[in-house]
Each structure stands twice: as C-alpha cells, then as structure tokens.
Amino acid sequence: GENVEQHPSTLSVQEGDSAVIKCTYSDSASNYFPWYKQELGKGPQLIIDIRSNVGEKKDQRIAVTLNKTAKHFSLHITETQPEDSAVYFCAASKGGGTYKYIFGTGTRLKVLA
Amino acid sequence: DTAVSQTPKYLVTQMGNDKSIKCEQNLGHDTMYWYKQDSKKFLKIMFSYNNKELIINETVPNRFSPKSPDKAHLNLHINSLELGDSAVYFCASSRGGANEKLFFGSGTQLSVL
C-alpha cells in the first residue's frame, strides 16, 4: 500500500549548523510533497511544498529537493536556530481527485544553543 | 481570528462514554478532514468531507461518526469510547481540489480512562 518512510526519527544539531531530513515514498503516482512543522501543543503547519514537475524549491533558510526516479525527497534547513526545534513531517499525495495525504512518521529536530 | 478552531482542547472521559469534538473553519474552504495522532506522533487520516460529502473514510471503526452540517463545520462523534481511542485528534481544512495546503486546528487531546 501507500507508504512514506522518514528518517531520522530524531535529529540534534548545533545552532547554526544545517539539518537534513529525508523521505521515501512508495506510490510512483504521487505528485505533491509538502513538509509540515509541528510545535509543541499545536497543529502541523505547512512550511514548504514541492510538486513533481520541479526538482528543487527554496524559501529563505529552508529548501526541498525531489528525486522522482529514486522516489526520494528531502528537507534542508540551513543556519538552524532554536526556534526551528519542532517535529517535522513529510507527506505525499497523488491528487487526481483524491484528498489523501500520506504522512511520514515525523522527525523531532532539536537545535542546541 | 483562528482559522481552524476545534473544541474542546482537552477531553478526559471514562471507557464506554460517548463524546463529541467540534470543528469550525472560517477560511471559506470546501474540504475538511479529521486526523488522528497517536502517542508516537503518527498522523493518520480518518475522514475527509468535500462540500459536506464524505470522500474519505479510512477504515475507521463505526463508533466514529463524522457530521458536516455545512461547509464550515465538521464534527466528530465517538460512541463507546475505548482505551485505544486515546490520542490527539486534529481537524484540518483545505481549498477544494487535490494537492492543496492543509490548515490544521490546534488539536483535541482525548484521554480515555
């Protein structure tokens, strides 16, 4: 069935360093890949997304890359700050009249000051 | 103004009871969702409604019954609560169509004793 694997499950970095979170999806029909950030006690919030016709997208300190052949996509956060500490989720969707997002298992990112 | 609001934020109840969680969005979105997040932070879709019509029902027990009185509201009623129902339940909404950004509420933490 549809599946999204996410690694690592926890990640600790020093403030100012970069963080990379990786996801692999199983359904080759997936064409939309959002990333959500969930802070403690809050709902997930979209931080960046990428569609299958694009290989890379950047928004200030965050970027997402997509390798459709390998069915991999990754989140890159540069110059990490303490406020980046949260749980990050990747997701995949195949559109086409479905409204179903398959979420990864989450990565708890800790940025150490 | 809160875009997606759900009540209550916390719900503590005994096994066997019936309870409801309410959700309202003021974004003018056509599609609303219920997600369940377990203790390991896994996010799984339960239901999705588009223009008040059920479009996703992810093999959720019949004890869970969503109700959408209008496009802005999607309530979740749970009968005969079980210990395994303890989780955080998130309501979300998006514009009509697939591959649209999800806007999540802040969650309802349900504890079944």
Image (cartoon, rainbow, N blue to C red):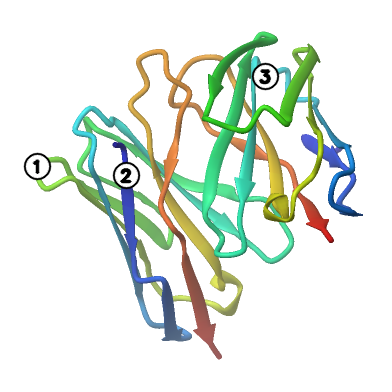
Q: Tell me whether marks 2 and 1 sit on the same chain.
A: yes
Quadrant of the image occupied by residue B113: bottom right
User: Which of these two is toward me, A58 or A92?
Assistant: A92
Label 3 marks a residue whose chain is B
Residue B106 to residue A54: above or below: below
Residue A13 to residue B98: above or below: below
Amino acid carrying mark 1 in the image:
Thr
**Image check: A85 left or right of B81?**
left
Amino acid carrying mark 3 in the image:
His
Instruction: Identify the residue under disc 3.
Output: B29
Tell me the mark number nearer the camera, choosing from 3 and 2: 2
Few, some or many C-alpha atoms within 10 Å of disc 3 (few <14, some 14-19, many ≥20)?
Answer: some
Instruction: Identify the residue under disc 1.
Output: A69
**Image check: A42 left or right of A13?**
right
Q: Position of residue B40 (x, y in %)?
A: 55, 64
Q: Position of residue A9 (x, y in %)?
A: 41, 71
Amino acid carrying mark 2 in the image:
Asn
Task: Please report contact status of discs 3 and 1: CB closer than 8 Å, yes or no.
Answer: no
Few, some or many C-alpha atoms within 10 Å of disc 2 (few <14, some 14-19, many ≥20)?
Answer: some
**Image check: A7 left or right of A89?**
left
Compute the Cα span from label 3 to label 2: 27 Å
Q: Secondary structure at mark 3?
A: loop
Q: Position of residue A82 (x, y in %)?
A: 58, 79
Residue A79 to residue B79: above or below: below
Q: Secondary structure at mark 1?
A: loop
Tell me the mark number nearer the camera, choosing from 2 and 1: 2
Instruction: Identify the residue under disc 2.
Output: A3
Mark drawn on residue A8 = none
